[in-house]
Every structure is written in structure tokens, then in C-alpha cells.
Amino acid sequence: MLKSIGKTLLGAVFVGGLFVPHAFAETTLNALFMAQAAYSEADVRSMTEAFTKANPDIKVNLEFVPYEGLHDKTVLAQGSGGGYDVVLFDVIWPAEYATNKVLVDVSSKITDDMKKGVLPGAWTTVQYDGKYYGMPWILDTKYLFYNKEILEKAGIKAPPKTWEELGQQAKIIQDKGLLKTPIAWSWAQAEAVICDYTTLVSAYGGDFLKDGKPDFQNGGGAAALKYMVDSYKSGLTNPNSKEFLEEDVRKVFENGDAAFALNWTYMYNMANDPKDSKVAGKVGVVPAPGVAGSSEVSAVNGSMGLGVTAVSKHPDEAWKYIEFMTSQATQNQYAKLSLPIWASSYDDPAVTKGQEELIATAKLGLAAMYPRPTTPKYQQLSTALQQAIQESLLGQATPEDALKTAAENSGL
Amino acid sequence: MSGTWMTTRAWLLMLPLLAIMVAVIGWPLVDTVRLSFTDAQLVGTAGNYVGFDNYTKMLTSSNFTRTLSTTTWFAVVSVAAEMVLGVLAALLLNQEFRGRAVLRGLMILPWALPTVVNATLWRLIYNPEYGALNAALTQLHLIDDYRSWLGEPGTALAALIVADCWKNFPLVALIALAALQAVPRDITAAALVDGAGPFNRFRFVILPYLAGPLMVALVLRTIEAFKVFDIIWVMTRGGPANSTRSLSILVYQEAFSFQRAGSGASLALIVTLLVTVLAVAYATLVRKTAGSAT
């Protein structure tokens, strides 16, 4: 009996010890990142290590989730009243996060040097209603990757400049028996398919919204979906694309099973790594094509930023961490999987060396970045569009009808 | 000691547990009911009273009816298959043969795996480019070409049901096996002497012993299958074109992705009600079977 009381007391002391504050003033930040595309988990960890080495009084707990879980995880942590100090957010969320007060307004912390140094396009990632809700961090768009060896075997001199030409080249490759289905996309029922769709909407000069009301069912928006459906039905597009996310596209491309693939920056150096990729050294990258009479190139704004949450008890330390992570020095050092937000980095040999082709492409692509709609109801709009695209691909509805239904279900 | 004191003591002893249950189950439930009558958002506004608006909106939406039928189909087929497979496996493992103990242990493995791990494994198996299922079927010349299992509405739900069965039939097998061991040997031996064939022995001698425990397994599995979320979320996220979206996924989207806590709560309560009706129906059935068995 005495023994068990002793054990209980010991347990109580132990549990109590967990709540005793540390003897020295140490701040712990909780940060939420994604384990997918752009900077790898290893990159983020070593950047953070460099930060804590320079700031020994700040500790940073890192958590990584797949992109598909990032939004819900952020919102849920907020709803439960605790959680993260720093969160990674996608370009499509600031409207919602600002309206629902998930992120704090950091406009006063953005210095003139930052405003001058960072590419203007990058700022759209973190702005809503004229205010800043964080720092841009990942500057990204989808590029057209191609397999140089396959194009050469097919006798194709240059990669396509228009989407129509892409179809023609894929047909040549298919006819010569080089590949059964030469084009790979990420068309799973997820945000990924919206990024591919947006790229095409920008090529066809479409609009998502007009005066706050859906307009994607008309003009360029409808033409973009029609292109997807035609490419799918013609058999030039890998039919498995409709269950692919970006990582699936990467694996297919790295295996040499795709001549063309739409994907983010990170695929360039990964597909060129002979350790995992069968196509190392044969990877070509150009901006996503345009449409004759409408656009030269096309691109989706797939950038992401880092922000401080409204529930953070250490907003100053959190901002310090964000400043470090988004600094030019840090970004230049890790410029292989994600390109810097800083304009002058693109002329820095330390950044451009070994990836000149990617940098040249990025200059064109990043300048053409087209935004997905800015609305607090983005998630609902996106879900409705995902369904419309998949129904059209599966032949359950015509693109026109599917988009009309999506417009009705968009909540706008 | 008097009976009243015994009763009082029993209640006193249960009091801490009851208090905890009211706190962690009762209060959230009451709060969910309150939420379901408001237009509250998940973050931000607390919401205004809107009466039965959420309920009528949810019950009349095409999303709800479609999802309800998907979920029902998933639950009926997967639970039926799990019951049959489970009983067959139990009968097999009740035989005496070398290595039986090892096999019994191995059988538990799928059930012991976390659902997320199971779902990820099956996603790899179904992979359209390099999945094991495609490789096996093409090598056996059953299909000509690799195909997309989770990307076609015709096969996606079936593929999910197979994955769910693989994970959950061991539970049924385990319960059935325990019940089988309670069947007196002299009765089966007597049936054998009387010339009863294998089917008649199972139907008239063994099944009456299995009925009660199997009913419990049926109740548990049906309720679980009706609430299915994780295996679908990991494997298809409800796609393609929403053909595998279950009720729980609809609740999640409404309440968390779209942040409409009010209508999400009403939908969650509708699902809870459906499951409760199922549970009560089964419980009555169990009591009846138990009554007739003795």
C-alpha cells in the first residue's frame, strides 16, 4: 500500500515537472509546412537548424503534412484555440484567412528594402485587400517539362510553343510507337487539377470571375476544359492522369513514360538526379505553351507564403523566423527545388549555375503567372470545379454543362 | 448489507465515470445539436439561430442522397463479404493441422494495421503505372493492359471495398473462431455418425452456436462501415467525380473544408441518427436471437 502511494506521488511529481517553466527564457515556435513539392523536408530542417543556431533562445518545432491537408490542419488548429505560430499558406487562401482572422496583418513589418527587392508577382501571394498577411516564400508555377531524347527520336526540333502544337507533337511520338500516351498531368480530384486547368485558362484568355460572379463557364474557361477533354479522349494524354497528383506525374516522367509533363519547379532537379531518375540529363523545361492569337506562354500562380497566426503568443519571434526563412541568403543557398522570391537572385551565378535552362524558363513563366480567383469561398469553388473537370473527363457530362453546374455550386 | 445500500454504492462508484462521460460525450453532443440550428462558421462568427434550415438544406441536396446511396452500398457489400470470408476463415482455422497457431496469428495482422497504413498499401497495389494488381493480372493474361482502378467510377468503389474487407474480415474470423471452440465435440461427432454431410453439419449443428456472436460482429462492422472515412480519404478522397464520397467525407467537407460548422453539425447529427437506428434495430435482433437460442 505504502509502496503504491509512493509510486503515485512519484508520478505526480513527474507530471508536475512537465509544467514547470524552463529555468532560462526559451521560446518555442510551432511551424507547419508541407511535405510535397518545392523545398524538401530536409531543406526546411537544415534552414531551421541554421536559424536556431543563430538564435539559441528560440526553438522551432516543425511539422510536415501533405499539401492536401495543409489548409484544413491550419484552420482546425485555429478553431481549437491553439497550435501553430507560423504556417505555410497557398496563394489561394489569404482571402479566407484574412476574413476569418487566421493570419495577422504584417503590413507594418514589410520594409522598403523588401518591397524593392522581391519580385512584384511574388507579393500577390500574400496580399488581400491591400494588406500583407505574410512573406512570399515559394515562388512557383507549372512549367512544361519534356524528354529531350524522345523528342529527338521523333524528329521534333523544338518543344511546342502552343497547346495545339503540343497535341501535334504528342501525336507524332505516339504514331512512331515511342510512347503509348505521351502527356502526363495531375488531374486527380484535388487542387492539383485546378492548377493545370488554370494554366490553360490563362492560355485561352479566360476569366474565373467577372464582377464577383463565376465566368469560367464562358469563353476561355470553357475552351480550357474542352482542350483537356479532347486531349484525354484522343488518347494522347495518359488516362491515369485523372488519378495523378504531382508526385505521380514526376514518377511517370522520371521513368521515361512521358514525353511531356506539366509540373512545378522542383521536378527539374529531381528528374535530373541519376540516383532516382532514368531520364537524368535529358530533362528539358520551357514555359507552358500559349494559344495562337491569345497568349505567348501560360502559367498559374502556384506560389506560397509564410504567415504568423492570430493565436501565436510569440508573434515577434515568429516573424524573425519568417524573415530568416525568406531571406535572400537562405533562399539562394537552397535554390535547387524552389527558386528565390528576390529579383537579383536570378542574376546571381550561385543560383543560376547548373540550372541555366530552368532560370531562363522561370523568367518567362513567373512573369506570366495567372491567379486563381481571390475569394473567401475559394474551397467551395475549387471543389465544385474539381468535380466538373472529372465528370467531363469521364464523359458523365459535357464540359459546358459541367461548368454551368460548377458555377451554380460555387457558392458565389 | 441491504439492497438499497448496494445500489447506492454502485451509483457512487460509477459517478466519476458518469461525470467524465457527460463531459466528453454529453456536452459536445448537446453543443453539436445547438450548432446545427445556427449558421455558425468554424472560425469567426458564432452564428444566428436559423431553425431547421440546415436540416432541410442538407436532406434535400442531391449530394446527400447520392452520398447516402454510396455509403449504403459500401456498407452492405463490404460487411456481407467480411461475414462470409470471416466465417470461412474461422472454419478453416478451427481444423487441426500443423502451423495452425502461426496462421491464426498471421490472420490478425491486417486487422492490427492502422487503417491509414492499410489504405496506403492498397493504393500502391492499385497503382495504375506500377501496381502489383496490374502486374499480376497482366501476367495471368486476365487483362491486356495496365488500367486505372481508382480512377474509374466503375471500379473505384469496388476496389475500396476489397481493401476494407481485407482489413476487417479478421475481426469477424476472430469472433467466429472463439464461438466455434465452444461447439461441443460430441455433438459434431454424433452428427457425423448420423450421416450429416458437411453443409448440414454447418447449417444445423454449428451455425446455431455462431449466430449470437456473429450478430455482435455484424452490428459492430455495420456501424463502422457506415461511418467510413479514413480508408476512402487516403485512397481516393471521394473521387473520381465524387463516386466514392461517403457521408463522413461529406460532413468533413461541409464542416471543415468549407468551414460551415452549422450545416456540418446538422449533417453529422443526421448520420448519427441513421447509425443509431441501425444499432437499435440490431440490438433488438440480437436479443431475439439470444432468446430463441436458449
Image (cartoon, coloured by chain):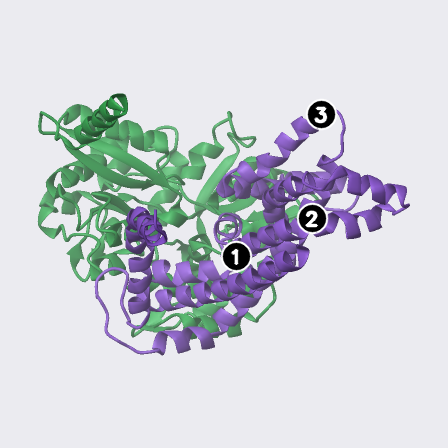
- Tag 1 subunit: B
Q: Which residue is mark 1?
A: B223
Rendered shade, chain B: purple
Q: Is residue B240 positioned above or below A116 on the image?
A: below
Q: Position of residue A290 (x, y in %)?
A: 45, 57
Residue at position x 29%, y 59% from top? Answer: B27
Q: Which mark is residue B209?
A: 2
Q: Which mark is residue B99?
A: 3
Return the residue nearer the eye: B29 or A325: B29
Q: Is residue A213 visible?
A: yes
- Tag 2 subunit: B
- Tag 3 subunit: B
Q: Earlier in the sequence, mark 2 or mark 3?
A: 3
Farthest residue to the right: give it. Answer: B195
Return the residue nearer the eye: A80 or B87: B87
Mark 2 is on which residue type? Answer: Tyr
Q: CA distance from mark 1 to mark 2?
A: 23 Å
Task: Give the tally of numbered discs.
Answer: 3
Q: Quadrant of the C terminus of chain A?
A: bottom left
